[in-house]
Image (cartoon, helix red, strand yellow):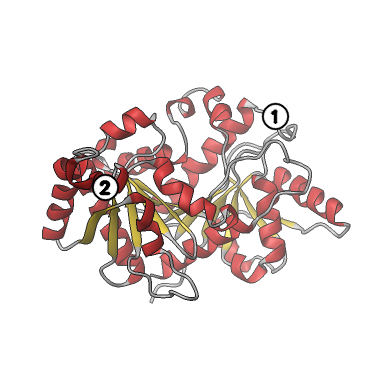
């Protein structure tokens, strides 16, 4: 059996809370963080560790500058291993949009994506980036709305395919609920237009493949309707009859254990795993648009939410929050979601 390879944590925007929550994760969960390293900037991580220590009244966690990925295994416990994967970054003001931070975050992400695609690391966990800073960084970073599109582009280039030939989906998960989205960051009118037989079928098959690997069995997938009461037989809309139900039937013919469409206001409760209901009816819910799927997950606790990109030839997870410029540099950021993202990434690699 091949020994596990390291997991890279990309530093995210240096002016945001990414470096801080990474420092706190290594401080709070040294056992979990073993076998991981930061793909980022050594000095920025030292500054973050010093800031965290100052706000806590304790000694700063040391930062180990790595010479390469192979050095991760020899890194001593109770320190933050950092691999400088882009030119040294100057000290930047906390909480301010900066093109330098955007470009550095983009370079870190592309480095980690390519390392994962080449099999040099087992997975990557991405700390938050700032979309405006990414845009201000200019080419090639301004072409991408965010992490997902950058990873999709890197994977397509590696596989010698067009980007549209590497379809991806966003799954938001916590210990109670998994939700996969048909569409993500588009206007609601566009999201409705995105509900087609092809898009729902593709989402179901991507979800089926990804969860089959991680669960070790065929997942039970519930499909939410688009309209109130899932259209009520056509009284409140025809999308369920025209697009969603036929996509479910097509997926089932391909071995996918999908059911629905169900009323969106109750289906998430049927998939929620709790102490009183440890074996929920479904393993995941496919939601038709962003807010339909993310509101129920985030209501259960943003600090436990993990963003997982499905469909990529690599494992990528991320905390379910942004750069939080309003609290950057104050020592107030909660690392819980990043810690969960590392935990989920390790479980997916093991699976």
Going from N to C along the chain, the mark reached first, 1 or 2, is 1
Q: Which secondary structure, mark 2?
A: helix
The nearer-to-camera label among 1 and 2 is: 2
Outermost residue toward the right in this view? 57
Report x, y in % for residue 116: 42, 53
Q: In this view, does 345 lie above or below 162?
A: below
Report x, y in % for residue 270: 36, 64
Q: According to the image, label 1 marks what residue?
A: 96
Tally of marks:
2
Q: Which secondary structure, mark 1?
A: loop
In the rendered image, which quarter contains the N terminus?
A: bottom left
Q: Which of 53 and 303 is in front in this view?
A: 303
Q: In this view, does 302 lie above or below 291?
A: below
CA gap, disc 1 and disc 2: 44 Å
How packed mark 1 is, by other alpha carbons closer than 10 Å (few <14, some 14-19, many 20 or more), is some
Q: Which of 174 and 115 is in front in this view?
A: 174
Residue 334 shows in this picture: yes
């Amino acid at each position: 059996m091949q020994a596990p390879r390291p997991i890279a944590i990309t530093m995210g925007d240096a002016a945001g809370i990414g470096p801080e929550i990474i420092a706190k994760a290594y401080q709070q969960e040294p056992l979990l963080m073993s076998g991981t390293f930061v793909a980022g900037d050594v000095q920025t991580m030292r500054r973050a560790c010093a800031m965290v220590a100052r706000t806590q009244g304790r000694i700063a966690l040391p930062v180990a500058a790595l010479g390469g990925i192979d050095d991760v295994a020899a890194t001593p416990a109770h320190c933050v291993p950092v691999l400088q994967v882009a030119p040294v970054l100057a000290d930047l003001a906390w909480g301010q949009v900066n093109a330098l931070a955007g470009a550095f975050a983009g370079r870190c992400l592309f480095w980690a994506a390519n390392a994962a695609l080449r099999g040099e690391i087992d997975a990557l966990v991405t700390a938050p980036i700032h979309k405006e800073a990414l845009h201000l960084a200019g080419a090639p970073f301004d072409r991408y709305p965010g992490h997902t599109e950058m990873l999709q582009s890197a994977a397509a280039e590696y596989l010698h395919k067009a980007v549209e030939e590497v379809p991806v989906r966003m799954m938001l998960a916590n210990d109670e609920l998994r939700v996969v989205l048909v569409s993500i960051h588009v206007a609601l009118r566009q999201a409705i237009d995105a509900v087609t037989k092809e898009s729902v079928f593709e989402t179901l098959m991507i979800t089926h493949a990804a969860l089959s690997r991680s669960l070790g069995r065929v997942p039970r997938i519930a499909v939410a309707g688009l309209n109130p009461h899932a259209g009520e037989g056509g009284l409140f809309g025809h999308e369920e009859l025209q697009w969603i139900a036929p996509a479910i039937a097509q997926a089932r013919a391909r071995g996918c254990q999908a059911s629905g469409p169900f009323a969106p206001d109750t289906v998430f409760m049927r998939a929620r795993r709790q102490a009183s209901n440890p074996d929920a009816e479904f393993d995941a819910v496919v939601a038709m648009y962003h807010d339909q799927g993310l509101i129920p997950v985030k209501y259960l606790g943003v600090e436990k939410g993990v963003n997982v990109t499905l469909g990529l030839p690599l494992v990528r997870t991320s905390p379910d929050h942004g750069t939080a410029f309003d609290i950057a540099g104050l020592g107030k950021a909660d690392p819980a979601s990043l810690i969960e993202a590392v935990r989920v990434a390790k479980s997916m690699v093991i699976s």
